[in-house]
Image: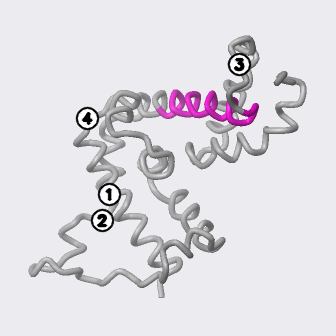
């Protein structure tokens, strides 16, 4: 299969941008990652072996560019900024009473599998991710949506496993509360 770089932007640009946006939660960062992806693909076009579709090949390059972008952002973010962001999210002590039961029971959202097909759920999820600290949203997307292993996230973002799990816990709790407000019954 021959690659056609002249049509990459027209054929795959919107898809690549949406993919980058779901990961970065930042339009400028997403645009930069797509540009870097296309430049890298162009400069390594001879390494394409045809084992995957053009879009899959470009997406794998983009994934690496997005991770590089997140890594750069996390290096520029100070530890104090991360701690402040984490401190704004709910603490476990606030979610449970002294008998270790929910202080406020989570809403029943119905069938979780059916929710994945629900456009309103995805709108609410994107809203909630957009309104949480950027580094937590990015970490959540890497781990929970892209399925990255903790060890890889630690290496790529230069943080400890304890930081990953603490930040994931906080992002999950923040998302739960936000989603309860947006779609809860």
- Up/down of 16 relative to 155, above or below: below
> From mark 3 to mark 1, how far is it between C-alphas?
40 Å
> From mark 4 to mark 3, how far is it between C-alphas?
35 Å
User: Which residues fall within the magenta stretch?
Assistant: 53-70
Q: Does label 3 or label 1 sit earlier along the sequence? A: 3
Q: Nearer the viewer, mark 4 or mark 2?
A: 4
Q: Does label 1 or label 4 sit earlier along the sequence? A: 4
Asked if the residues shown at circle 1 and circle 2 are in contact, with their CB atoms under 8 angstroms apart, the answer is yes
Front-most of residues 14 and 53: 53
Q: In the image, 54: left or right of 21?
A: right
Residue found at x 83% / y 33%: 9
Q: Does label 4 or label 2 sit earlier along the sequence? A: 2
Read off the residue under disc 4. 160
Q: Nearer the viewer, mark 3 or mark 1?
A: 3
Read off the residue under disc 2. 90
Q: Does label 4 or label 3 sit earlier along the sequence? A: 3
Disc 2, SS: loop
Asked if the residues shown at circle 4 and circle 3 are in contact, with their CB atoms under 8 angstroms apart, the answer is no
- Up/down of 181 relative to 130, above or below: below
Magenta stretch contains residue 61:
yes
Read off the residue under disc 3. 48
Front-most of residues 70 and 4: 4
Asked if the residues shown at circle 1 and circle 4 are in contact, with their CB atoms under 8 angstroms apart, the answer is no
Asked if the residues shown at circle 4 and circle 2 are in contact, with their CB atoms under 8 angstroms apart, the answer is no
Q: Does label 2 or label 3 sit earlier along the sequence? A: 3
Read off the residue under disc 1. 170
- Up/down of 112 relative to 83, above or below: below
Residue found at x 34% / y 59%: 88
């Amino acid at each position: 299969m021959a690659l056609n770089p002249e049509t990459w932007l027209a054929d795959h640009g919107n898809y690549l941008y949406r993919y980058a946006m779901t990961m970065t939660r930042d339009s400028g960062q997403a645009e930069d990652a797509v540009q870097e992806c296309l430049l890298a693909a162009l400069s390594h076009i001879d390494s394409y072996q045809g084992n995957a579709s053009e879009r899959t090949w470009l997406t794998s390059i983009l994934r690496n560019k997005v991770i590089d972008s997140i890594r750069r952002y996390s290096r520029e973010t100070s530890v104090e900024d991360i701690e402040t962001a984490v401190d704004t999210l709910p603490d476990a002590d606030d979610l449970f009473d002294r008998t270790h039961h929910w202080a406020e029971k989570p809403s029943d959202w119905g069938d979780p599998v059916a929710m994945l097909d629900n456009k309103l759920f995805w709108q609410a999820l994107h809203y909630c991710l957009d309104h949480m600290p950027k580094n937590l949203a990015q970490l959540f997307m890497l781990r929970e949506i892209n399925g990255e292993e903790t060890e890889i996230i630690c290496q790529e973002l230069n943080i400890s496993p304890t930081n990953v799990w603490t930040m994931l816990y906080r992002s999950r709790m923040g998302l739960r509360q936000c989603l309860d407000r947006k779609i809860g019954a």
